[in-house]
Structure formats: C-alpha cells, structure tokens
Image (cartoon, rainbow, N blue to C red):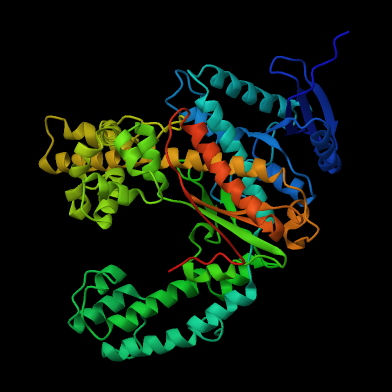
Amino acid sequence: MTPAAEPSHAVVARSTSGGWVIALHAGVDAVPEIIDVPHDELVSRVHELEQRRSPRWTVRSLRTFYPPLLAAGVRLRRAHDLLLCHAILRDTASLARPLAPSRRWLRVDDDVDGAPGQPGLFDVGDAAAERDDGVDEVREQWRAQLAALASAPDSRLALLCAAESAGALIAEEMTAAGLPWSTRVHQGILEQQLGARPLRGARPARMAALADQIGRCLDDPGLNPDSPPRLLRALHRAGVFVDSTSRWELSRVEHPVVGPLLEYKKLARLFAANGWAWLDDWVHEERFRPVYLTGGVVTGRWASSGGGALQIPRQLRTAVRADPGWTLVDADVAQLEPRVLAAMSRDSAMVDAARGRDLYEGVVRSGAVTTRDEAKYAVLGAMYGATTGKSGQLVPRLRSVYPRAMALVDAAARTGEQGGVVSTLLGRSSPRPDDAWRLAQSQAGGPDAAGADESRARSSARDRGRFTRNFIVQGTAAEWALLWLAEIRHRLMALPPTSMPAPASGPVFRDRAHLAFFLHDEVIVHAPAEQADAVAGILREAADAATARLFPGFAIDVPLDVHIAEDAAKGA
C-alpha cells in the first residue's frame, strides 16, 4: 500500500464555533486532512505540526495570525499570505486573467489595531454558516491564487508572491524581537540637544531660548516660531521676503534671524518626532517595536504604522545599541536603484559604471558628466523624470552613453503618460489611472476644450509618466530587497543558538541572531558577538544570492557596506 503523501500546505481559518480549522493538503487537488482545533490549543497544535511536518502555512493575513505564535515561542518556516498575494494577483498586468477584485480580500492598513470596517481574523461572515465555511473560503482563495500563478507565462509572479509572504513573516518577527534601543543614551541625546525634559505642554529650555532670540531678531516679542503664518508675517515685516519658512528658502537669506531659526526648526523636529513622548510610547524594555507594513507602498516598498520606523534620525542612531555580549551587524547597499536599472535594462555600459563601490564615479569615468555630483543629479533625474534644473540639463547626456537604460525608463514614462500600466521585473503592476485623470484627458481632447484644460491634462500626463518611470525601478529594487531579506532569514536560521541570551528579544530570538531592522536598502542584524563575522558573511552571501535570483545569468555588482559595532551610528 502506497503511504499518503506528506502534506505540503496547511490552510488555516477560524470556525464559526470560535475555534480553528486546519486543512492539511498534500497537493492542491488532494483530499485534505481536516483538523478541528479549540482556540486555546491553536498555538500548541501549530507548533507540533511545524516541528513534525513544516508545511507552508496558508492564512488570510500573517499580520494577525503570526504575532500570537511568536509571543508563545513558535516560529514558522514557510507561509503564504493570501491578502498580500491577492493584491498582487488582482492588479497585475502580467496575467491574461488577473484575480477578480473582492472586498473580502482587500487589505485594510489604516489602523493595525482595528480600523472601522476591518474584517476580523478569518471572519467567516454568516453566523449560520457551517463550521468549516471559513476554511472553505480561505481554501477557495488559495486555489484561485495557485491557478492564477499556474497561468502565468513564467515563474516570476510565483517568486514575487513567495518573497512577499516571506517579507510578511520577517516583518512580524522584527516587531516581536524589536530593535535594541538604549533609553539612557536616547535621553542623554535629548538633554544634550534640548535641555532637561520640560513640563507637559512647555518647550524644552534650548528651544525656549531660541524662540526668545527669534522674537528679538524680528522685533516681535512672544512670537511663536511653530506658527508658519505668523512667522512668515514677522519675517516679511523685518524685510525677509521669503515665500515659505522652509529650511531651503531660509538658508538662501542673509539675516540675523536665520541661524537661530534654522536651529530652532532642527530641534523642534527632534522634540516632536523622537522626543520624550516618543520614547515613552515606543520604547519598552529597551526595545523599539515598530509595526511594519509589508508592501505598504504601491511599488512594494515597506511602510510603517506609527513610531517613524523608516525615519530614525542619524543623530539618534547611537541609541540603537546591542545587548551585552551581542553586537549589531549593519549592511547598506550602495546605490541600489541605479544598479537595478542597469541590470533590468541589460545596459552593458551602465553595468561597467556599476563595477566597484561607487556607481556615480563610474558614470564620471564614462564621460557622460565631469563630476560625481553631476553624475548623481543625472542618474536620479533619469529615474525620477527631471525636466528642469540641473538634473533636467544633465539627463540628455545619459541617453547617448546609456541608451538601453534610458530607453527602458523613457518607455515606462510614455506608457504612463498615455494612461497605461507598467510592471516591475517580477510582475507587480502600477495602479491604473483614476476616473478623474481619465476625464481630464478626455476633456482636453474634446472640441470645446480650452487652453487651461489642455495644460492641466498635459501636466497630469507628465506627472503620471514620472510616476511610472520611477515605479519600475523602485519596485524592482524593492523586489531585490525582499529576496535579500528572505535569503538572510534562511541563512540565520541555520546558525546555532548562543549561551549568552538577550531576553528582551522575546522567546524566539533571545538566543539566536535575528533581523532587527530593515529600511529599503539597509538591514541590521542583532547577533551574538561570537557570530558577528559569520553574520557579516551571511549578509554578503544573501545579497549575491538575491542578485542571481532576480537577474539570472547576468552579472551586476551590488556591493554592501558592512559594519560590526555596538551601536548603529553612521559616519558624518
């Protein structure tokens, strides 16, 4: 008798009885093994199945399913996030028949704690439904997604869905482990920069002194520098005729008020964004635990919900500090997006410029421009569609030197201007233009169109072209980063545990090297000190593997800047 095949997928959903149903599938069409699990036994049953069978866990959303498991010390090796993958497969232009839109499978990212109207965890709808209707609905969506992927012309969309789901696992794991954060160091920085902690509603001492100085300079005692309208009127009365109070405009003016005003604005940003209130709200037990939103941006980049996880100021990075006996291994990718553009377009001249650590110096060597600053302006201008200023003047020079790279982004811009959709290398597609955009374009082409209508339509078309031009590059760079993260996670899991625990990292990560932070092209791993060199090697190996996976058979340098240190401080 042939033994039953080992299940490769575990589809999980709530039952109407308040418990759970786990459907173990050896294949899509195989008869599943159905397991009813009481609510209070879910963690133990998942742990048991993960240890014995290690299936791919298919769930509505890892953002709600995974955190309780991590809190109980259970880690999943593989998963499929149906909400994240539905968003990709519903909107992609890479399929002849994308998934049909469904309100039941829309993501709700407005409030991770429960926005109005947000579906509950595996909500099964009708209370009169049979006990397994929830799992049937989830299984139906899972089968629909697998069928859609099977209809794709190649495996790239499947790779994107796998990477997106791996990213969802990593996001929840980084929140669970937290980023090591020294409250003492952070408070010291605040006191050095701002003075002692003020009473609620008051300004710190240094900001108060600067506000008084600004008022004296503008002959306006009691002026509130936090009020842009009042500050702008005071500046005008003093003969400082600026259009706004932005740092850029103020820095072009010579007046005694400029110095203290720029300093005040700098300190005000620190106080508001990362002051004592932020420290109270977001750092607990020496860990900063932001909520990461996988695919939170249309290009596939991550976002965060609260805490400013993607905007840690340089001046506070010394507060990111490893636990005793541990260290931080920090890796930055050098100029990721231009390198991705070179590889996507297979522009051999741009690939040559990318050899080594500094792509911009390579652009200078090509003769397209004369200085590194010009190279940076030109390359960024090419990716973001600059038509004016220094970037706009330099971009045309790139077309003769890097014809394939420029042709790729120029074609994406034309598609966007015409209302079309573009896709990343793995198949994530840009949003379609909305009805207002289409109406404006239609009205501009009508017999009664005025000059203003035509001007608005041209402007909005150019704006959309700039968006689609950048979408393909930023989105493909986000895919490289997802593959990099997944490769890092896989390799870190193979490292042995340490005898020097870091209890604040939680039950899963207290004795294991783990990803602690991610920002577009940077990762920080919190690692036992004795594993620091091994982790540095893993970060480099994972980058090479991600590059080979995304650009098979094509060589492109994606160098890393790797640092091993007690804190995450950046150089000047």
Residue 13 placement: quadrant: top right
Q: Quadrant of the N terminus?
A: top right
Counting from the top left corner in percent of width and height, residue 255 is at 22, 83
Counting from the top left corner in percent of width and height, residue 341 is at 36, 38
- What is the residue that sits farthest to the right in this orientation? 1
Q: Is residue 446 left or right of residue 42?
A: left
Counting from the top left corner in percent of width and height, residue 96 is at 44, 18
Point 33% across, 40% down: residue: 352
321 to 310, vertically: above or below: below
Q: Quadrant of the C terminus?
A: bottom left
**Along the line of sight, the residue nearer the viewer: 298 or 227:** 298
Point 40% across, 47% down: residue: 356
Counting from the top left corner in percent of width and height, residue 7 is at 77, 23
Residue 250 placement: quadrant: bottom left
The answer, for residue 511, to whether it is visible in the render is: yes
Q: Is residue 491 left or right of residue 69?
A: left
**Along the line of sight, the residue nearer the viewer: 370 or 164:** 370
The answer, for residue 432, to whether it is visible in the render is: no
